Image (cartoon, helix red, strand yellow):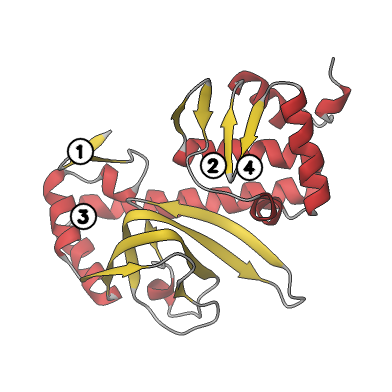
Amino acid sequence: MRLDGSRAWPDNSVVGRLTAPQRDELLSLGTRREFAAGQVLLRQGELSTHLFVLTNGHVKIISESDTGRTILLAVRSRGDLVGELAGMDASPRMARVVAIGAISTRVLGFSEFEAFLERTPAAVKIVNASIAGKLRSATDKIVDFSSQEVPVRVARALLRILADHGRPAQGGVSIGIPLTQPELAAIVAASEPAVHKALAELRKHGVISVGYRNYIVLDLPRLRECADPPENISTRP
């Protein structure tokens, strides 16, 4: 992991992939702004083009359908960009962004960010790769929702979160972000009872442990098995 002072930037984040000079320049732009837990950074449907560089903490990306259903699209953390798409096509915001706990950010106008990219062509590839990753993740979720049962969707959701935010924990690997069961249900577009049942099966087979807003993966190979085949893990020996 790359270091910024005494702290590491996640290697898979935009800031983490930049060189030290590129990172220093990006983090010198805009203004510093902090948000308390539950504060809204961006609202779905609003017309604005500024973006955020997350320098500490996590945010959740939430979409609300015309029927009022809430879907948790993603969680972003330290080193990630949030809200960069609106400036590219001047379209209304596609989702609401809410702070999970206290967070700190750099807020940039899109023109300032665009000028940074023009000065730093190598950073364009990094930002494009980040956007491509978000699109790929969204496509994977659409496929999951249309073709997979809830236990498989839960296993895949945990693996995706683990890949982005996981960190070592006693006995296994923590998913690295605070996440309630209702929020996990929103991620996989399933009912809370169905998600609770899927988690219970994973716990029963020693794949995960579940604490207060925390999940620790105890058996990563088994979790990958659960995410791969179509059959429910309750049918496994």
Which of pointers 4 and 1 lies earlier in the amino acid sequence? 1
Residue under pointer 2? 161
Q: Which quarter shows the N terminus?
A: top left
* Mark positioned earlier in the residue sequence (3 or 2): 3
- Graded by Cα atoms within 10 Å as few (under 14), some (14 to 19) or many (20 or more), the crowding at tag 2 reads some
Q: Residues within 10 Å of mark 4 (few under 14, many from 20)?
A: many
Q: Earlier in the sequence, mark 1 or mark 2?
A: 1
Q: CA distance from mark 3 to mark 2?
A: 30 Å
Side (left or right) of 202 relative to 15: right
Tell me if 6 is positioned left or right of 10 in this view: left
Q: Secondary structure at mark 3?
A: helix
What type is the residue that disc 1 sits on? Leu
In the picture of the structure, the residue carrying the numbered disc 1 is 3
Q: Nearer the viewer, mark 3 or mark 1?
A: 1
The amino acid sitting under disc 4 is Ala
Please report contact status of discs 4 and 2: CB closer than 8 Å, yes or no.
Answer: yes
Rendered image: mark on residue 121? 3
- Kind of residue at badge 2: Ile
Task: Say which residue label 4 marks.
Answer: 157
- Report helix, strand or loop for mark 4: helix
Q: CA distance from mark 4 to mark 1?
A: 28 Å
Query: Closer to the camera: disc 3 or disc 4?
Result: 4
State the residue at coordinates (47%, 40%).
Answer: 176
